[in-house]
């Protein structure tokens, strides 16, 4: 889909800070992260949301697991939240299925801190990408 920003990222027409990919999915750093290492996992094919085609969950599952382990290993996250919004009322802003992998750290635990942006989470995304890939 030409008007979908995530389809444009998949096609390479728009740059992203990719940290993982396979034949079915790609993962890249969120440009407005809530927590350091906040990563989006998307299928290469266009699906509006996770309720539109249940098969899409299987396509992105290996990427979700890989990225979750990557942020724990490379960034020292002690846990992750895995979140997907379906529909605008649920907070979906880009209508191409995507899963947020939100690294969580011991100094800001729990559900209450999930929706609060960590100060500096978006600082130097290029260096963060290098750390994740290194």
Image (cartoon, rainbow, N blue to C red):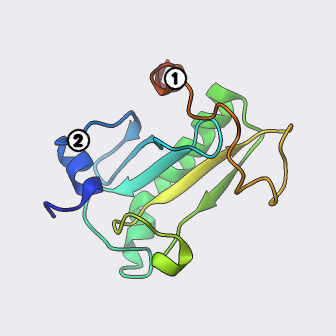
Precedes in sequence: disc 1 or disc 2: 2
| Residue identifier under label 2 | 14
Q: Who's the residue at 62% across and 26% down the image?
A: 74
| Residue identifier under label 1 | 124
Characterize the local packing of mark 2: few (<14), some (14-19) or many (20 or more) Cα atoms within 10 angstroms. Answer: few
Image quarter hosting the N terminus: bottom left
Measured in 3D between alpha carbons, the distance from the residue under mark 1 to the one under mark 2, in whole angstroms, is 19 Å
Q: Are marks 1 and 2 in contact (CB under 8 Å)?
A: no
Q: Who's the residue at 83% across and 43% down the image?
A: 108
Residue 105 point in image, percent of width and height:
78, 39
Residue 92 point in image, percent of width and height:
47, 69
Identify whether 85 is placed above or below 27: below
Characterize the local packing of mark 1: few (<14), some (14-19) or many (20 or more) Cα atoms within 10 angstroms. Answer: few
Regarding mark 1 in the picture, which secondary structure is present there? Answer: loop
Camera-side residue: 84 or 116?
116
Residue 15 point in image, percent of width and height:
27, 36
Residue 104 point in image, percent of width and height:
73, 44
Identify whether 59 is placed above or below 117: below
């Amino acid at each position: 889909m030409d008007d979908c920003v995530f389809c444009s990222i998949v096609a390479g027409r728009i740059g992203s800070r990719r940290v993982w990919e396979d034949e079915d999915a790609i993962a890249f750093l969120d440009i407005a992260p809530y927590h350091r290492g906040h990563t989006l996992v998307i299928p290469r094919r266009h699906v509006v949301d996770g309720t539109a085609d249940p098969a899409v969950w299987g396509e992105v599952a290996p990427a979700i697991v890989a990225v979750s382990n990557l942020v724990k290993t490379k960034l020292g996250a002690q846990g992750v939240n895995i979140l997907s919004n379906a529909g605008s009322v649920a907070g979906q802003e880009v209508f191409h299925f995507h899963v947020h992998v939100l690294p969580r750290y011991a100094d800001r635990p729990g559900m209450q801190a999930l929706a609060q942006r960590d100060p500096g989470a978006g600082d130097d995304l290029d260096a963060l990408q290098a750390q994740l890939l290194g």
